[in-house]
Image (cartoon, helix red, strand yellow):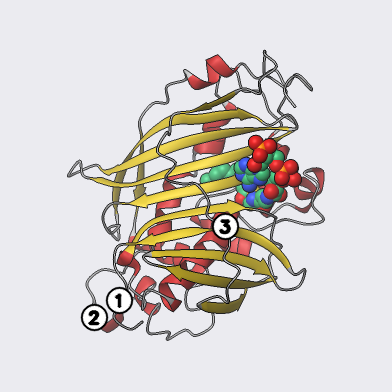
Amino acid sequence: MAGSGNSGIDPELVISHKFPESLHTYTERDAAIYALGVGACTKDAIDDKELKYVYHQDGQEFIQVLPTFSTLFTVGIPSQMEQLPGLPFDPRLLLHGQQYIEVYKPLPSHGCILNKTSIAGLHDKGKAAVLEVEIVSYEKESGERLCMNRLSIYLRGAGGFSKSSQPYSYSSNHSNQSAFPKIPKSQPFAVYEECTHASQALLYRLSGDYNPLHSDPKFAESAGFSRPILHGLCTLGFAVRTIIKCICGGDQNTIKSVSGRFLLHVYPGETLITEMWLEGLRVIYQVKVKERNRAVLFGFVDLDRLSSSL
Ligand SMILES: CCCCCCC/C=C/C(=O)SCCNC(=O)CCNC(=O)[C@H](O)C(C)(C)COP(=O)(O)OP(=O)(O)OC[C@H]1O[C@@H](n2cnc3c(N)ncnc32)[C@H](O)[C@@H]1OP(=O)(O)O
């Protein structure tokens, strides 16, 4: 509830903050390491729908890039948050809450990206604060807009900063594009099961997210977990890759937008079961961890066309 504590957050200072523009350069190797990190070709090293993400399959000139690779353009955010005036927080208590992605054109296999970052929201949830950050990414050379990522960061213990009896809530996004649909009660259109590896987070972190929550047992324990947990964006990468494989006929370029809410942490080595429902051009999905029979992620993916193989 509003006013239940005082985390020292100064909301007006936070939402008026202006981030400097930043550059992010990547190569084909980064795109391939990312694809392996989210499980591409793990079940089958010659998978004909996935080899293209890690190898110049059939002589293709460039490797193909998964749309969720764009989430890597945001890896600098947690360290930028530490410099953010008016936002004191304990980095051990920070969790990734939600991710929304819009893809405007296929991601190139290498390039230099210009990121424009802004605060998109701040909410007082009493026991937590939720900060939303939006990053619009452009291809530096052409100036063309490539994608947009909006992430919600859940800061445990940082709520209670509202000055009035109404909980503080600011959002720059009025379009409700990322509102979550209900999980249908009907049987899923497709279900796909896949194991993550015990070393999944250690592989995924090589894509640039070096938060010790995912690799350091002592840090993970101090954050309240029995061992390091998987990056939320790794779980999201598994889910979207699964949707591309099961619904999009392997064509990653049919993805227009992706939305996901992280419901519970995943331990590397656990088995992910992704359930998918197709409603027009929208795929509603839910990921469960088999070993604990718990939902860990849900959301939707909007497509720009349906695969002819459906
Ligand atoms: C590129 C890097 C980006 C930054 C990353 C930061 C570093 C962390 C990286 C990670 O990858 S962490 C691993 C991935 N994330 C997780 O594992 C989180 C899983 N989710 C949870 O553990 C829980 O859902 C939660 C976030 C702890 C919240 O659970 P809790 O029981 O405390 O919430 P509720 O009581 O249900 O709701 C309170 C309030 O908060 C809203 N809310 C709930 N969940 C989320 C969420 N995932 N994202 C945003 N907001 C959330 C909920 O709607 C309630 O609001 P009101 O309805 O009361 O207004």
Residue, disc 3: 182
Whole-percent x, y for residue 32 in the image: 41, 66
Q: Amino acid at mark 2?
A: Gly
Please indicate, yes or no, whether residue 66 appears anywhere in the rendered image. yes
Depth check, mark 2 against mark 3: the one in front is 3
Depth check, mark 1 against mark 3: the one in front is 3
Residue, disc 2: 59
* Residue for point 60% across, 77% down: 194
SS for callout 3: loop
For the residues labelled 1 and 2, say whether their Cβ atoms are less than 8 Å apart.
Answer: yes
- Taking 237 as reference, is 104 left or right? left
- Could you say which disc has been placed on residue 56 in the image? 1
Q: Amino acid at mark 3?
A: Lys
SS for callout 1: loop
* Residue for point 54% across, 55% down: 233
Q: Measure the alpha-carbon separation of dots 1 and 2.
A: 5 Å
